[in-house]
Image (cartoon, helix red, strand yellow):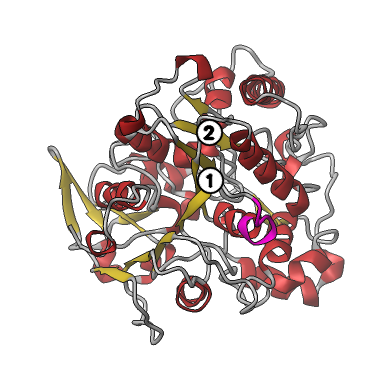
Amino acid sequence: MVRSSNFISSLKKATIVLSGLLLLGCSTDPEWLKPSGKAITAPDKTLGFEQYVTQTQATIEQVVSKVHFRDKDAESPFVGGYNASQIAQMRAPFQLPKSNQSRCTNQAQGAAKGFLLIHGLTDSPYLLKNMADSLRAQYPCALIRSVLLPGHGTVIGDTLSMSYKQWKKATDYGVNSFQAEKSINELYVVGFSTGTALAIQHVLENTKSSKIKGLVLLSTAVKANSGLAWLAPYIKGLKPWVGVNKDRDGARYSSFSTNAGAQFYLLTRDMLDKKNQLDIPVLMAVSADDATIDALAARQYFCENVVNKRKLLVWYQGFADQPQLSCDGILTVEKPILEQTQGDVKYRYANASHTGVSVNPMDAHYGVQGVYRDCKSYEKSDDDSQWLKCVEDTGVKTFGEKNIADMPDVLAKGMWRRGTFNKDYDALVEKVVCFTDSQCSTAHLQSTK
């Protein structure tokens, strides 16, 4: 996922006052802002997937233990009190079922289906674990795998030297792992944010990947939500960080390096070119208010570059102006009413956020009652009082995209949290399940139910 918060202003400052930029390597930098020396890389193509999962999880645990748990008696720095082993399990690649030998063979239960999940920038496979579980419930005999993009999972300092070319190699490895599975003849690639761009690029560049029958693109990222993103490759050596936050989210990184933005720009810079057309079934889900990616560019790509007739764009309305561009296959989900309930819990859901589209509101980490609250907008280097108030607030709870920060009528004098779940997750899953079933009609896909 590409974070756009303060991105434009940071890049403008970088072009004006280069002499004032901080350089990486200062002795005062916390250890997690420095390279670990054990950054995750693209796996060797001969490595078995189960071994890849085991080795990667062990590396993550080793790095997290060294950096964040050096003092054995100190409390966990992560919200939720997770230990190093739990962090590694959250961030590591995974497979369902864990062993190929435990797969069932019932064709009616998806034995011929495979799903490859690709997470976003500064994220981890955890952002797609709910989707994996939902697919597993629908297709108990399917094979579901996720990859970890190089530079991710360990510490944010490892994003300073990562390359989009390595991400593409990891994507190729994931796809090829299914090519070798003789029982799989239908592969669906499910991408989130940057993972959507990698899925698209793979299909465009590997026409012989015949097992791929469709793409599910959540928070579709074909262009950054910043007109100055092109500067990132040029200033990354002078300004290493776009934004630095305390490392408290067990599932993903909380800071954002300039190189992360640079690699995303290099990956997607030609994506909207008309030559990049997809003649493959595509399901997209995008928030009109997305603060991370260019939502209108995603809509444009859907209308102008996806040429297959089996396609659907789930468009979550928000506070943004209604787009001019329209075409067949767009299902508009109206902006929700503000007051919501989940069981006995009341909360306020203003609009769909980039970070929440793929997550179940019941999720134990990111859900309505999850342990983690995205309150980074209240974080200050010298005082955590406002951040703590946001995290612990038991009054008005408003979840939404970043644009609600300037909407007092929405906040009702309360504090806001960036949305980390999708209120309409169950409806989205129904669309995904229908989409991955060739017998399910396009008309059903475009139903709002």
Q: Position of residue 104 (x, y in %)?
A: 39, 20
Along the line of sight, which residue is nearer the eye, 195 or 273?
273
Q: Identify the residue at the far left of this view.
A: 344
Between marks 2 and 1, how big is the CA–CA gap? 41 Å
Along the line of sight, which residue is nearer the eye, 24 or 164?
164
Range shown magenta: 203-208
Q: Return the residue at label 1.
A: 383
Along the line of sight, which residue is nearer the eye, 172 or 186?
186
Q: Is residue 99 visible?
A: no
Residue neighbourhood size for the residue with mark 2, other residues' Cα within 10 Å, grouped as few (<14), some (14–19), many (≥20)? many
Give the side of residue 54 with respect to residue 354, left or right.
right
Corner quadrant of residue 77: top right
- Write the residue at 44% across / 20% down: 103
Q: Return the residue at label 2.
A: 145
Locate the C terminus and report the quarter of the image it occupies.
Answer: bottom left
Q: Position of residue 245 (x, y in %)?
A: 60, 47
Q: Secondary structure at mark 2?
A: strand
Q: Is residue 248 above or below residue 165?
A: above
Q: Tell me the number on the disc at residue 173.
A: none
Residue type at tag 2: Arg
Give the side of residue 103 with respect to residue 12, left or right.
left
